[in-house]
Amino acid sequence: MFRLISIVSLLGTVGGIALYHLVLRSRHISHEKERRDVLRFGLLERCMHALALLSLMALGFTGFASVIVFGSPLRGWLWLAHFMAAPVFAVSVAVIALIWAEDGRFEGHDWKWLRHLGGYLWKKEGLPAGRFNAGQKAYFWFIGLASIVVIVSGVGRLYPVFGAAGQEIVYQGHRYGALAFLIAVISHLYLGTLWAMVTGHVGSNWSKHHHPVWWERIQEGGK
């Protein structure tokens, strides 16, 4: 059953992204050609994000390749690669959580962004957003919670101390937590500004349009 759920969920996520791109994405304002001279992410943030993403890709490939392709639990070289990527993922996610905890705090203006769904379904201007908008903050906390579930259940799989029934719960929690995590990350890769995470910089017009509260703060010398 989990194999079928995984296939349907992952294909559905990719299909939903493709549909959104074809139908609604073109309605958004583009600032792709402007000069990117505003620092958005520092070197440490970008390195930790890259480590988290690369280790997640290794974990996702080994874990879901075993389930979807082979229809069996992890074993052999897949298990070894999974085991080696896990601590890298745990450490990088923990560092990211510490760095972005303050930026992920919800503020009063975030509710206006949520009421308008961030302009993703209809074109809206003047939606307030700090360094992270309300959607990114919700994603941040969801990823934090999912990371705890996946990491703790993964450790629980290595040290079976809960008995047969308890270990089954741990096993299912790890699988479904990982699936939810992967779906969220796939969506984030499309909706997020990947180029900003690669170069660390964004344009001033992009900043004013998408994160006006943050733009005002950095003009005043804040973060």
Image (cartoon, grey):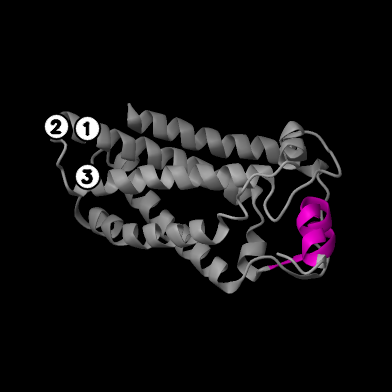
Q: Are marks 2 and 1 in contact (CB under 8 Å)?
A: yes
Q: CA distance from mark 1 to mark 3?
A: 9 Å
Residue 31 vs 138, above or below: the answer is below
- Mark 3, other Cα within 10 Å: few <14 / some 14–19 / many ≥20: some
- Check residue 217 for magenta coloring: yes
- Check residue 88 for magenta coloring: no
Q: Position of residue 160 (x, y in %)?
A: 15, 43
Query: Quarter of the image containing the N terminus?
Result: top left
Q: Residue furthest top?
A: 1
Q: Position of residue 173 (x, y in %)?
A: 32, 35
Which residue position is annotated with label 3? 157
- Would you say residue 31 is visible in this rendering? no
In depth, the one of 27 and 43 nearer the eye is 43
Amino acid type of disc 2? Ala
Amino acid type of disc 1? Glu
* Secondary structure predominantly adopted by residues drawn in magenta: helix
Q: Which disc number belongs to residue 72?
A: none
